[in-house]
Each structure stands twice: as structure tokens, then as C-alpha cells.
Amino acid sequence: MIDGSTVRYPLFDIELTRPLSDLPLSSGDTGVAILVRRKGVPIAFWLQEVSGIPGIPVEELARRIGEKAGEKIVAEAIHDEMTLAPSAVFLPLLTIAICTKDRPEGVERLLGSLLGQMAALPEGSAGYEILIVDNAPSDERTRELAARYPEVRYAREPRPGLNFARNRALREAGGEVLAFLDDDVIVDQYWSIGLARAWTENRDAAAFTGQVLPMELETEAQVIFETRGGFRRGFDRVRYGPVLRGNPLYPGGAGIFGAGANMAFRVAVLKQLGGFDEALDTGPAVPGGGDLDIFYRIIRAGHPLVYEPQFLVFHQHRRDMRSLFVQYRRSWGLGFMCYVSKCLKNDPERRVNLIRLILWWFVNLLLYFQRHLRRKLQGRPHFPPSLFLGELWGGAIGLLGGYSRSRRRVDEIRKRSR
């Protein structure tokens, strides 16, 4: 599957209410990524290796759709019959926050995808505002970009760290709902419809997360990341509450609820909880854990959290192996264990389960490392074992005082900014 050679997986977006056709391929394509929708709702996604063929014939495509999405097609048809009519779906005023640092190209790309969302909002919705929070920028490029868009409001947060920027967005938000989008995503054309449906069907929910699929799969690093699961969380709508049957480690875990690249909150609840923990997602020192922490706190405070696949964005995965290694080591290793360490200290009622979570995490990664090291030595397709080692090393650093060190570092930042 992954052997170090050049890879390219074109993405195909298939709507089942339209006639199927052959999928054309180029000579350099080594695989395909296929997204299947029904009436705009994503219901399946998979990667498929190809080798030296001009395309996937429609008969083969139809067979694979039946295998991958047959039950889901039936479930969506039933869901259509049992849920609210489109005319009953709406959103209150929505603030869309883009927290960014020195990446105006990504922000501009995201804005281009967002500006069509007003027309896509269900009738009766209150509209939306777009807020760019520029986090300790080194130049004026993002401010100058925002000035070219009259529908965009700009705020500068001088203290470095993503959660400082998120809390600045919370203070600035004028909407009842606050959505956060990373500057390396674009929104799907049905993004606001998915959020509006989730809101309308779950009026007591405090948070909403959505599907995150790849924007492109053109390098080995991108295909490795997506083959390991990427940011995907499936195509079933899920309403999370105090317990999750069959998961004794709940609500702990690595990304069980969704990803911070695409999330929304009821502003009043987020303020009641004190906003985001500024000792997590602090930048290069601890580039992760902030989204996991706020999801955990929302569930532990007794609020529902809803995952809606139609609330969909496409993410620009890291293109080179070095950047991917850093992501696993720091964001997914260090950031995760800093978040768990905080929970261990602040939530004694769940301490035993959190210790079990830590043990499971290390054992699971060690098993992955051994399996793929063996496959590498046997000359079989494998993921680079160094990815698992990096994640383990980052986790160990986070567990051994990473959160406390981050708290002290953030306290110093606050003192300097007074």
C-alpha cells in the first residue's frame, strides 16, 4: 500500500441522484479517492489503489458503491422520511472564526469557499459574520487581505497560541453560534446546511462537529495520513451524551468527537465554561489538545455534542514526510498527553479510566510500531515505523510534565502582555 514510491490519488465526488459514469484516470494515478453523496449528504468515502488502468468502469463503480454504501443509502432514505422538512431548518446568527498566523494564502482560499454560504443558508436563518483573528502575526499580509473583503471583520490577538486566538474570537463573536475553521480547510457547498440541520434537530446541544475529508492526495505523506484514518469520523450522525455504550474510556480519547479544524459551539455555554484552556494549543510548544479538552469539558458538564457528516470541510494535509512526522509527534502525541494530564488532575472521578486510556494508547501504538516494523523488514507495504515512534515519544514528553510546563509558559506570556 505504501512503499515510498510516487503516489497520486485523484478525488471523485459522486452524487447518487445523478447518473453514474466511468471515472477517467491518468497514467500517473496510483489510486483514487471516492466520495459518495445522496442529495448532498456524504454517505461514504474510500481510497482504492489502481495500477495502469485508464479508468474505473461504471459497472465496477456501481458494485463498489453497493458494497460500501448500500445500507447507508437505505438509512438516509428513512432519515429523510422521519426528520424535519427543509423549510423548518434554520440557524441563528452565526459567527465564523478563522484563527490564523502568517498564512494569508490559506485564509483567502477559505474565504473563497465561505462567501457562497449565505445563499446556501436555509430560509429563515439569521445570517452569518466572518471574523479573522490574526494571532501574533509577523507581518501585515492577513490584515491587508481582510481589508479587501467588506463582509470580513478583523481582530489581532498579540499573544501567541491558537487558544489565545480562539478566546479572542469568543469575546468578539456577535452570533449565538460560533464556528471555528482552520486556515488549511475549505468548506463544502452544503456546510452551513449541515450545521443548520444539526442545530434544528438538537436545540439543546452545546457543540457540533463535522466531517473532515482531504482536499488533495498528491503526495506520499498525504496518502499515508488519510490511509491511517485522517480526520474522518464516519458518516453516521451521532449525538454524544454522558455515556457511550461499549466505550469504557469515554469521554476520553483521541478525536472521538471530531476535529478542531471544523467545530461550532453555543456561545453562551462556551463562555459559561470559561472558554478554551490557553495552556493547550499554544503553538509549537504544545500544538494540540485544545479541541480535545473543550469537547471533554462540554460532555462532563452535561451538555450534548452532535457530530453531523454534512457539516463538511476539506483539509489540506501536510505534503511532506517531515511535516507529517512533526504532526504525529507533537500534535497527536504531545498535545494529546498534555490534555490527558490535565484531565487526570482536574477530574478525579474519571482518574481510573484516564489511566486506562493512557495504558491503552501506549500499548496500541507499540503494537502498531512492531507490526509495521516487521512488514518493513519483510519488504511488504507498511507505514513508516518512525511515525509511531515519534507519536510515542511526544506522548511520553507530554505525560512527564508537559501540561505543567505549558501552564508556566502561558503565565509568562500573560505577564508580558499586561
Image: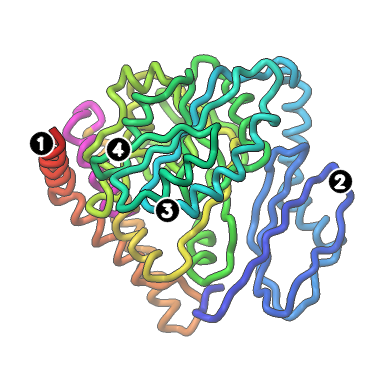
Q: Please, is residue 324 above or below residue 20 in the view?
A: below
| Mark with earlier residue (2, 1) | 2
| Mark with earlier residue (1, 4) | 4
Range shown magenta = 332-350
Q: Are marks 1 and 3 in contact (CB under 8 Å)?
A: no
Residue annotated with mark 4: 157
Q: Are marks 4 and 2 in contact (CB under 8 Å)?
A: no
Residue annotated with mark 2: 18
Q: Secondary structure at mark 3?
A: loop
Residue 179 placement (x, y as % from top left): 48, 31
> How many residues crowd around disc 1 within 10 Å: few (fewer than 14), some, or many (20 or more)?
few
Residue 384 placement (x, y as % from top left): 41, 73
| Mark with earlier residue (3, 2) | 2
Q: Please, is residue 196 above or below residue 412 in the view?
A: above
- The prevailing secondary structure element of the residues shown in magenta is helix
Tell me which amino acid carries mark 2.
Arg
Q: Secondary structure at mark 2?
A: loop
| Mark with earlier residue (4, 2) | 2
Whole-number angstrom distance, CA of label 1 to CA of label 4: 15 Å
Whole-number angstrom distance, CA of label 1 to CA of label 3: 27 Å
The one of 150 and 301 positioned closer to us in this rendering:
150
Tell me which amino acid carries mark 1.
Lys
Residue 316 placement (x, y as % from top left): 52, 56
Residue annotated with mark 1: 415
Tell me which amino acid carries mark 3.
Arg
Please say whether residue 45 is visible from this viewpoint.
Answer: yes
